[in-house]
Image (tube, rainbow, N blue to C red):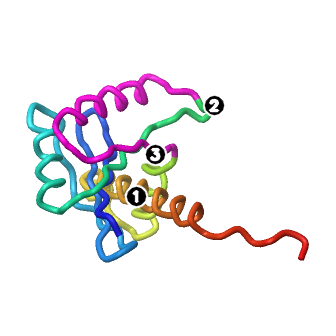
Amino acid sequence: MPGLLALDVGEKRIGVAVNEWGDLVVPLGVIPRGPNDLEEIRRHVTERFIDRIIVGLPISLDDTLGTQAQKVLKFVERLKAVVSVPIETYDERFSTHEAEQMMIEADVSRQRRRQSIDALAAAQILKGYLSTQAERSRPREEEGG
């Protein structure tokens, strides 16, 4: 199984998650947006032997690329200049909402949620990506027989 790194790119922070031991997804934390954010991602890629980066793309509910999605695509272009692994985008429409709902159900305080939401959203992106890949690799059942 290749090492995957997922990113939830926001205005102030980048949530980071990895897959370890097959399909186990681990939220790593956040990288503050700033002059060293790309270098920090490159360091994760090198130290964790990452083969591919998955970046959450916030596609609008009407399937268009809004302002935030355009910003993420520009970030991806800048990231391509500092890493040598393939980068894919993945529809992350509900990842932050799902991560927040999980933390509310686990009775995590509002302050703690604020500190963890981006990393958990990155984990949701990676789980969704892995699930999609598993669906694509499953043999289709014969119809009718």
In the displayed orientation, state which residue is furthest to the right: 144
For residue 88, side relative to residue 21 (left or right): right
Q: Label 2 is placed on what type of residue?
A: Asp
Q: On the image, numbered disc 2 is attached to which residue?
A: 62
Q: Label 1 is placed on what type of residue?
A: Leu
Query: Sequence-wise, which precedes: disc 3 or disc 2?
Result: 2
Mark 3: which secondary structure? strand
Mark 2: which secondary structure? loop
Residue 43 location, x and y as percent? 11, 51
- Magenta region: 64-93
Q: Which mark is nearer the camera, 2 or 1? A: 1
Query: Sequence-wise, which precedes: disc 2 or disc 1?
Result: 2
Count neighbours of disc 3 (C-alpha within 10 A) and say few if under 14, some if 14 to 19, many if 20 or more: some
Residue shown at 39% from the left, 63% from the top? 103
- When asked about the image quadrant of residue 136, the answer is bottom right
Q: Which mark is nearer the camera, 3 or 2? A: 3
Query: Sequence-wise, which precedes: disc 3 or disc 1?
Result: 3
Residue shown at 35% from the left, 70% from the top? 1
- Would you place residue 22 above or below residue 131 in this image? below
Mark 1: which secondary structure? helix
For residue 33, side relative to residue 75 (left or right): left
Of the pair 60 and 45, the residue shown nearer to us: 45
Q: On the image, numbered disc 1 is attached to which residue?
A: 126
- Which mark, residue 90? 3
For residue 49, side relative to residue 129 (left or right): left
Residue 123 falls inside the magenta stretch: no
